[in-house]
Image (tube, helix red, strand yellow):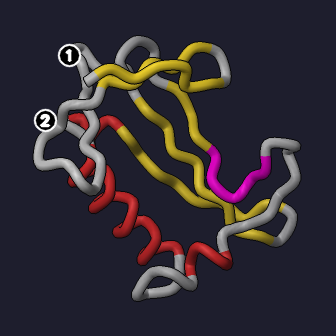
C-alpha cells in the first residue's frame, strides 16, 4: 500500500497450487464468499489506519473448481499504519521488500 500497491491471493499456496477457501469459509458466520468478504472488510477496517481499508478490494473466482480470493490493493498517498489485535493504536509500519516482510517499526 505504501508505495506501489499490489495483489494478494488467498486460497493459493506459495507453490501456486489452488487450495481454495473452504476451510476459511467455515470460520465465518455466513460460510460463503459474501461472509468471507464481510470478514475481510471488517479486518481491514480494524487493522489499517485512516481510510486505507478502502484501498483493498477483494474479489472471488472459481479456479480449478475451488474458490479463491484476489485482493487488489491500490497505492496509498499517505503512510499506512497497522494495528495488531493487542494494540490500541495503529502504530506499526511494515516494510515489504520483494517477497518478504523484512522489518517493522513502531
Q: How many marks?
A: 2
Residue at position x 53%, y 27% in the image: 6
Quadrant where the image shows the N terminus: top left
Disc 2 to disc 1: CB gap under 8 Å:
yes
Along the line of sight, which residue is nearer the eye, 60 or 8? 8
Residue at position x 25%, y 43% in the image: 83
Image location of residue 5, percent across then percent down: 45, 23
**Dot 2, crowdedness within 10 Å: few (<14), some or many (≥20)?**
some
CA gap between label 2 and label 1 equals 9 Å
Using the image, determine if residue 83 lies above or below residue 42: above
Image location of residue 101, percent across then percent down: 55, 25
Q: Give the label on residue 50, or none.
A: 2
Q: Which residues are magenta?
A: 9-13
**SS class of the residue under badge 1?**
loop
Label 1, on which residue?
78
Residue 32 appears left or right of 50? right
Residue 61 appears left or right of 55? right
Residue 81 appears left or right of 67? left
Residue 40 is one of the magenta-drawn residues:
no
Quadrant where the image shows the C terminus: top left
Using the image, determine if residue 4 lies above or below residue 88: above
To which quarter of the image does residue 25 belong? bottom right
Image location of residue 24, percent across then percent down: 58, 73
Residue 10 is one of the magenta-drawn residues:
yes
**SS class of the residue under badge 2?**
loop
Image location of residue 90, percent across then percent down: 17, 37
Magenta portion: prevailing SS class? loop
**Dot 1, crowdedness within 10 Å: few (<14), some or many (≥20)?**
few
Amino acid at each position: 500500500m505504501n508505495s506501489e500497491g499490489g495483489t494478494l491471493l488467498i486460497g493459493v499456496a506459495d507453490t501456486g497450487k489452488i487450495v481454495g477457501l473452504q476451510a476459511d469459509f467455515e470460520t465465518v458466520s455466513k460460510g460463503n464468499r459474501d461472509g468471507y468478504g464481510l470478514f475481510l472488510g471488517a479486518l481491514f477496517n480494524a487493522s489499517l489506519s485512516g481510510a486505507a481499508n478502502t484501498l483493498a478490494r477483494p474479489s472471488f473466482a472459481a479456479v480449478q473448481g475451488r474458490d479463491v480470493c484476489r485482493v487488489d490493493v491500490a497505492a496509498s498517498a499517505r503512510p499506512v499504519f497497522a494495528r495488531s489485535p493487542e494494540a490500541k493504536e495503529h502504530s506499526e509500519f511494515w516494510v515489504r521488500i520483494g517477497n518478504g516482510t523484512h522489518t517493522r517499526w513502531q
